[in-house]
Structures are given as structure tokens and as C-alpha cells.
Amino acid sequence: MMTTFDPSVMVGILVEDEVQFTLVELSRICHVDIAQVVALVDEGVLTPSGDNSGNWLFGGPTLRRARRALRLTCELELNPESAALVLDLLDEIEALRSRLRRLGNH
Amino acid sequence: MLDAALLKLMDAKDYYAVLGLKRTANADDIKRTYRKLARKYHPDVSKEADAEERFKSIAEAYEVLGDADARSAYDAAARRPQGRQKSGPPPGWDDSHEFGGGKDFQGSAFFDELFRRQAAGERVPRARQGLGGGDQHAKARIDLEDSYRGGTRMLLLSVPQSDAQGLVTMRERQLEVRIPKGIRDGQHLRLAGQGDPGLGSGAAGDLYLEINIAPDPHFRVDGRDVYVDMPVAPWEAILGAAITVLTPDGSVQLTVPAGSTGGRKLRLKGRGIPCTPAGDLYVLLSIVLPPANVEPAREAYRQMRDAFADFNPRRSLEA
């Protein structure tokens, strides 16, 4: 049986599973200069594969983390070092919230 | 920088009230107050229920009051009474956290007019160079059932659009999007060519849609796993029972093993979010005592007490 696809329905690509970004692509998607993304790599906030910035590849889940870090630097006027610390603490809070969810406390 | 016609369009939002400042506040006061409020309400760090909406207002107020020229224009305009107009995202759509670099910013009518000229250059930098359109970001909220079953959802977006002169206006877009089965909270869909259309023959940018799963009254989602509390009667826990568990995708039969205690966690393998690999559904047992508000029920408890004469629930607390 033929499956009919409605052409008006948008079919997206799941970024986290199917996409990798170069440094240039990630900077463009996040609307920032390349230097801002490089600064986040230098702080260990983002961890690309590849041995130099010319062949860095960022996994799909990087998009969420990069945008979060860049929102913090821009909107809270944080430097990359401070944003990195805030992200680490947010990760820890999320891990604790996750434990609460597993234990049955909302 | 502003003409009278623009000012007529202004939204009468009181930016000083938003920041809790007097009109006489100096630049340092404004900056200090903004930073304090931004830390409190920033959606990435705040758990206040209305954080996104509050932060949006705070950021908009600061964009104006934190800039000497914009503040002067605002103060001059505010001296003339104007009708209040409410701006905001369309219903069912969450676009309020789009501030990165000031390029995705979506503010009130006054804000849009005030920053129209520079926004035209900032928001579509690639279009100005005669290249393709920029990528855009938006959020969409779906129900847990949508993740379990997949399907299509009609979504309403408010997106900036540039015209031939590079002027940016907000417009509403309706998109029917296929939600892939098994998508998890916080993941993104890339919709090719659905970002800014750009100018001339340049290719359109992409739209990155962040998917958020709405809180569910029964189920708690943790990554790919899902948790549900399941009340059971004492005899079901002690003697064992077959119970029906409602999952986000229909009901399943679950065997409560004999000798279960309150808080026991039973795993339904592969019944969590149907991604690859599929998550698990955890059923947390909670023992509910039957009420004893009629005499036969109280008598049943008395018989139970007599039957368990040796039972001491506080034994571990005794020396």
C-alpha cells in the first residue's frame, strides 16, 4: 500500500541524532562570531572532535549547550569562564532534579 | 533617531515599572537593577513560574533604558499619553526565549520601531550581504503522548521577516510539522529552508525547533525513562496482584510480586520514550490504607491488630 505524504507537512531532521556541525556552521546557527564559540571550547564547555579548529566537528547535542552558554554570556553579561561555571552548576542541579524525579518527588 | 510617526506606534509599556525604578534613576542604577533581575529571572537559571515572560520584559526594558539615546526617546514619547497595546507570542507557541546576541529579540511594538533600523542589519546579516537567509530558532511544546506516538502537529510561530528594503517586521507563520516518534525533551528538529527567506536568489536559512515535552499530571519524564506512581492496596502488595497500568501509550498488565513494599520500583522494559534504544517505564508502588470510617472496617483493622500481635513497626528505633 502506498503511503501518501502531505507536502505541506514539514519533516525535520533530529539534530541530536543526525547532525554534526563544523565551527563555522555552529557559529552561524548561533548568530555569533567564531571567536565566541572557540572561547567556549577553550573553557571546556564544548568538546568537539578533531585536532584543530579547522576540522572540529560538534555533535548534535552541542547545539543546546552552546546556545545556553551564549545566552548566559550575552544576557547575564558573563565571561566564558563564568558561563562555564554556571553551566557546570546547572548540570549538577539537573542531575539532582533527575534523582528527585526517579525517587517520586516532583 | 526617532520621528513622531514612529512614536505614535509605541507600546505604552512602562519600562521603569518593569525594572522597579524611578524615572530619575541614573545609568548605574539601571545597570545594577537589570543585572540583579536578569540573574533572578533568566530562564536558564530561574525556576520562577513566569521567568521567561518576566525576563523578556526586563531585557526589553533594559535595551531601551540602558541606552542613553533610546532612553531619551522613550522618556520624550512617554510624556505623551498613548493607548496601551499588548504584544506577545501567539497562543500555544513559546518563542519568548529568543534573545541571543540581540539578533533574535522579539519585543513590543515600541521596541520594534525603536530598533527597526539597526535591527534590519543585525537580524539578517547574511541577507544584507546578498547571501542566503539566516537560521532561525523557535520552541515548540508537545505532549508526552506525541513523543510516544509521533504524528503531525500544527504549530504557530512568530518570526521576523525582512522585506526588499531590509526592514524587519514580525509575522505569524503556521507550520504543520511531523513530530518523530521517540523525540525527547530538549531535542531539536532542523527544518531545512524554513528559516529567514533571505533576499534575491539566496537560499533560505533553516529553522531549528527546540521540542519541549509539557509536564504531565501522571508521568514524570527523565531523559528516555518515564516514572509513574501506582497506588496499591496493602493486600495487593503483600499477596501479589495483577494490575492494569496506564502508560502514555495505552494500558499494560503488570504483576505486583508478592511481598512488595511501598516505594518498590518495578520496571517495564522498553515502555519509556520509544527512542533508540527505548527508555523504560518505572512504576513506583505506594501502599494506600483503606479508610476505616465504618464499623465493619474498624473491626477488620482490630482483627488485623490481633493477628499481628508480635508486629512492632518501631523495633529498629528501640535500644
Image (cartoon, coloured by chain):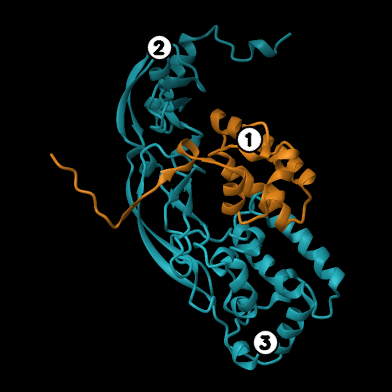
Residue A24 in percent (x, y) is at 60, 48
Q: What residue appears at the point 40 percent right and 28 percent down from the top-left corner?
A: B295
Residue mark closest to the camera, 2 vs 3: 3
* Circle 2 residue: B258
* Circle 3 residue: B2
Front residue of A32/B255: it is: A32
Image quarter (top left, top right, bottom left or bottom right) of the N terminus of chain B? bottom right
Amino acid type for the residue under numbered disc 3: Leu
**Do the CB atoms of the residues marked 1 and 3 lie less than 8 Å apart?**
no
Judge whether A67 appears above or below A52 on screen.
Answer: below
* Circle 1 residue: A48
Residue mark closest to the camera, 2 vs 1: 1
Residue B137 in percent (x, y) is at 52, 56
User: How crowded is the residue under tag 1: few (<14 C-alpha within 10 Å), some, or many (20+)?
Assistant: many
Amino acid type for the residue under numbered disc 1: Pro
Instruction: Please check whether the numbered discs 1 and 3 fall on a single chain.
Output: no
The colour one sees for chain A in the rendered image is orange
Q: Is residue B32 left or right of residue B129?
A: right
Front residue of A4/A48: it is: A48
Between marks 2 and 3, how big is the CA–CA gap? 76 Å
Judge whether B166 appears above or below B173 on screen.
Answer: below
Amino acid type for the residue under numbered disc 2: Ala
SS of the residue at dot 1?
loop
Between marks 1 and 3, how big is the CA–CA gap? 45 Å
